[in-house]
Image (cartoon, rainbow, N blue to C red):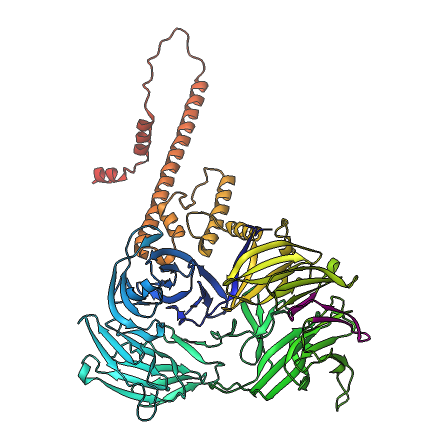
């Protein structure tokens, strides 16, 4: 079966958010950070994600606020485009097509209508290997349309570093400083002159002088540079090449990763592998303050424009909460209680990550030791984790190995505490195996909780929870119940059947099936060549099948009732994942430079769904997460996604999933319910007044059209439409809108008064006509044969003029006559 167009691969989390420096908006309300090919907008007060700015098709490499409009942001990407966004509404305003890979982006308030970007030099771009880069000024055309080509490029500096933090603009944009290797280049825009300063690779004291980052003072002629040896140099008088000076500050014991001046320039912030934010007082010598224990090595530092907020991004992908770290050594697990994704988080921790809200719930400290950030230091790492089906027990394995001969292994069992809504350590077992623990799993039997571990020492062990009172005579703990082996082979994988009645353990090329109740070896399967890479039992109606993959590109399915091979297929399956709520199996296979997906049932080798190249590179981990509600309206190709959703983690630490067209249609339908006018962006203010106007119109329909003394908003007023349909930050000045608004109301009032006066006149006419008719009828019938002169008829306009004369006040005339 070919891939269905109904199923699409979508990114739902992960990605590196520490690749470039995040930015804080002018009002300090939002934090913007790049994540893969998207930009995430977070609220600084609630930490919730507000918007996801999606439009780039490659890695986002730069973010800068628009200097002329603080509610807009520029982004650049390796896809060769610069995009302008309205981040408050999550709207893409314009795309500038450059046509070259863009590695960084800068803006300057002194250069309106121009952004500065780093591009590969023409020589390296033509060869396809980007080794030399240049800083160029890109003029942004002021043309209409959502997309425009931007080809007006002027070179500023050559041979610069593509790293964004290696270039900085000073004094609002009067000069730009860029460091590359051992050279610092400074370009002055008014002079149009470049000065270059070089350092030696190593001085007499063995210092490593290579530049790592650059920051420019916002008001003074001062440039701060960080170096590999942990020193910070403050450069002055660099406008004269022969008279330049620099002073040195030193606190960091390793490379300085980040530098940033505060907006007023009173402090210089620095960070490195020590996970300490250092605040140097500018102009006060070596006086400094510290913000310690930030959790991981600092990669970037950001400061809000008002100086009230500091933001640090860290090596383990934290700002400051973790999304996904550099490496995931545990499997992806689903917590049955919170439906959260469980995997490695901070060093020595497990993180519980909400898939629904794309945010971390909390970190669980497994190692319970202070993490020391020092290069070359061996520390405890969490390598394995497993959760039982009820979510009551969590098993973890932590390792620490200083050399190949010495390996410290600790197996820990954690019990869930209802009162604290978290896991607490119950049992700690040192050296549970003589070698590394290669796999572990919980039994699905709810009556007898059992954990099985396999080790490189050639044994698998079964651990049972039993009542073993401690010194105080309280509590239950875990202990070893059985130790098994098979012909001195090394076990690599293990898994339980859905009901916990069978245990399968892979020993090299042999699969053994055991009875956990009696620990009797029931059957063995051997399907050479290749060692067993993965094992899993079928579910529900396919529970009689056992599936295994080998290192020699073979997928096998055994029938446990006939104890024979049911079928096999030649495919390089790197990951086999069962769906706990259905019979479906997901198999990820390796292809040339990418990974393919096959979804099938063990009862037949024909795939239900297949898709080529679901991601570039290799899929590291995968898991099925149960849905809160069964997805309705699925056809045959999407039925496998109705009960559970498949998530997988790529080698680039991006969490991906599969979405169906029906899901996307539901999202679009729900969003359309909020849209009043398709031609404008919907805001809460607009929605509120829109409902008010709707109820007002309904009220007007029910009331008589002659109701007076009511001021109503004009339905077709251009002032009202402009006020409500236009985002607030792009409206004209308030005085201009106020005049339009008041004039529209005055015109409306005048019209109402005019209509009201006409209605009164008509009523008076009717009354006068009625009085006339009554007077004529009172006189009796006319005498026959008597001819009367016809009464002259007046027009309605003349009658109105006469009535106005009757109402006029002529008292002033009488006073004049009396005098």
Residue numbers of the magenta segment: 510-536
Is residue 535 a member of the stretch shown in magenta? Answer: yes
Is residue 627 a member of the stretch shown in magenta? Answer: no
Quadrant location of the C terminus in the rendered image: top left
Prevailing SS of the magenta stretch: strand
Question: How far across and how far down the image is residue 427, in percent?
Answer: 69, 84
Residue 356, quarter of the rendered image: bottom right
Identity of the residue drawn at 79% across and 62% down: 561
**Nearer the observer, 795 or 177:** 177
Residue 78, quarter of the rendered image: bottom left
Residue 769 to residue 325: above or below = above
Question: How far across and how far down the image is residue 323, in percent?
Answer: 52, 71
The outermost residue toward the bottom is 205
Q: In the figure, is residue 47 to the left or right of 634?
A: left
Residue 473, quarter of the rendered image: bottom right
Please count the marks in the image: 0
């Amino acid at each position: 079966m070919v891939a269905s167009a109904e199923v699409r691969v979508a990114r739902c989390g992960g990605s590196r958010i520490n690749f470039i420096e995040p930015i804080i908006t002018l009002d300090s309300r939002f934090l913007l950070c790049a994540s893969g090919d998207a930009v995430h907008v977070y609220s600084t007060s609630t930490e919730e994600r507000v918007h996801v700015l999606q439009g780039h098709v490659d890695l986002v490499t730069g973010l800068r606020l628009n200097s002329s409009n603080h509610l807009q942001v520029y982004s650049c990407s390796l896809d060769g485009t610069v995009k302008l966004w309205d981040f408050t509404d999550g709207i893409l305003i314009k795309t500038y097509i450059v046509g070259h890979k863009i590695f960084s982006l800068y803006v300057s308030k002194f250069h309106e209508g121009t952004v500065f970007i780093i591009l590969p030099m023409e020589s390296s771009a033509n060869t396809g290997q980007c080794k030399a880069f240049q800083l160029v000024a890109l003029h942004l055309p002021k043309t209409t349309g959502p997309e425009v080509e931007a080809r007006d490029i002027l070179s500023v500096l050559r041979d610069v570093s593509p790293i964004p933090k290696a270039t900085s603009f000073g004094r609002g944009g009067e000069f730009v400083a860029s460091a590359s290797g051992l050279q610092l280049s400074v370009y002055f825009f008014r002079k149009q002159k470049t000065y270059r300063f070089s350092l030696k690779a190593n001085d007499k004291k063995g210092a490593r002088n290579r530049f790592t980052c650059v920051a420019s003072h916002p008001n003074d002629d001062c440039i701060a540079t960080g170096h590999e040896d942990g020193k910070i140099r403050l450069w002055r008088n660099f406008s004269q090449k022969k008279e330049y000076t620099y002073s040195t500050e030193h606190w960091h014991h390793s490379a300085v990763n980040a530098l940033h001046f505060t907006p007023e320039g009173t402090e210089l912030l620095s960070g490195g592998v020590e996970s300490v934010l250092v605040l140097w007082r500018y102009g006060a010598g070596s006086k400094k303050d510290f913000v310690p224990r930030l959790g991981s090595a600092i990669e970037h530092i950001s400061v809000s424009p008002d100086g009230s907020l500091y933001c640090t991004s860290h090596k383990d992908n934290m700002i400051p909460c973790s999304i996904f770290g550099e490496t995931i050594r545990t499997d992806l697990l689903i917590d049955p209680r919170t439906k959260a994704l469980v995997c490695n988080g901070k060093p020595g921790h497990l993180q519980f990550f909400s898939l629904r809200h794309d945010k971390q719930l909390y970190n669980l400290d497994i190692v319970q030791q202070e993490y020391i950030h020092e290069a070359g230091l061996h520390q405890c790492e969490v390598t394995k984790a497993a959760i039982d089906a009820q979510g009551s027990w969590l098993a973890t394995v932590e390792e620490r190995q200083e050399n190949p001969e010495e390996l410290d292994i600790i197996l820990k069992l954690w019990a869930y505490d209802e009162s604290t809504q978290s896991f607490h350590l119950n049992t700690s077992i040192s050296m549970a195996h003589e070698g590394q623990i290669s796999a572990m799993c919980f039994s699905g039997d709810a009556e007898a909780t059992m954990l099985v571990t396999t080790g490189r020492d050639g044994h698998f062990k079964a651990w049972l929870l039993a009542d073993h009172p401690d010194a105080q005579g309280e509590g239950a703990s875990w202990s070893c119940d059985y130790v098994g082996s098979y012909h001195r082979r090394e076990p690599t994988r293990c898994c339980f059947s859905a009901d916990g009645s069978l245990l399968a353990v892979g020993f090299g090329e042999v699969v053994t099936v055991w009875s956990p109740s009696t620990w009797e070896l029931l059957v063995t399967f051997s399907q050479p060549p290749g060692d067993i890479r993965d094992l899993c039992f079928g579910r529900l109606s396919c529970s009689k099948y056992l599936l295994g993959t080998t290192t020699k590109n073979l997928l096998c399915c055994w029938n446990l009732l006939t104890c024979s091979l049911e079928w096999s297929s030649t495919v390089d399956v790197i990951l086999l994942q069962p769906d706990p709520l259905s019979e479906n199996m997901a198999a990820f296979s390796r292809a040339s430079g990418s990974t393919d997906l096959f979804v099938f049932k063990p009862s037949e080798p024909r795939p239900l769904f297949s898709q080529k190249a679901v991601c570039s590179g290799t899929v590291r981990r995968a898991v099925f997460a149960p849905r809160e509600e069964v997805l309705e309206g699925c056809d045959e190709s999407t039925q496998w996604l109705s009960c559970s959703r498949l998530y997988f983690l790529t080698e680039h630490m991006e969490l991906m999933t599969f979405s169906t067209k029906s899901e996307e249609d539901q999202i679009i339908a729900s969003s359309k319910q909020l849209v009043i006018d398709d031609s404008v962006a919907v805001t809460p203010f607009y929605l509120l007044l829109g409902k008010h106007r709707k109820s007002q119109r309904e009220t007007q329909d029910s009331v008589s059209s002659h109701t007076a003394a009511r001021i109503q908003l004009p339905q077709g007023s251009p002032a009202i439409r402009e006020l409500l349909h236009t985002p607030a930050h792009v409206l004209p000045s308030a005085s201009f809108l106020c005049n339009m608004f008041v004039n529209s109301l005055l015109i409306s009032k005048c019209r109402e008064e005019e209509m009201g006066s006409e209605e009164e006149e008509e009523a008076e006419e009717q009354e006068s006509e009625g009085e006339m008719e009554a007077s004529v009828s009172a006189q009796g019938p006319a005498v026959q044969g008597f001819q009367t002169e016809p009464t002259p008829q007046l027009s309605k306009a003349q009658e109105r003029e006469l009535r106005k004369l009757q109402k006029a006040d002529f008292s002033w005339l009488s006073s004049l006559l009396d005098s």
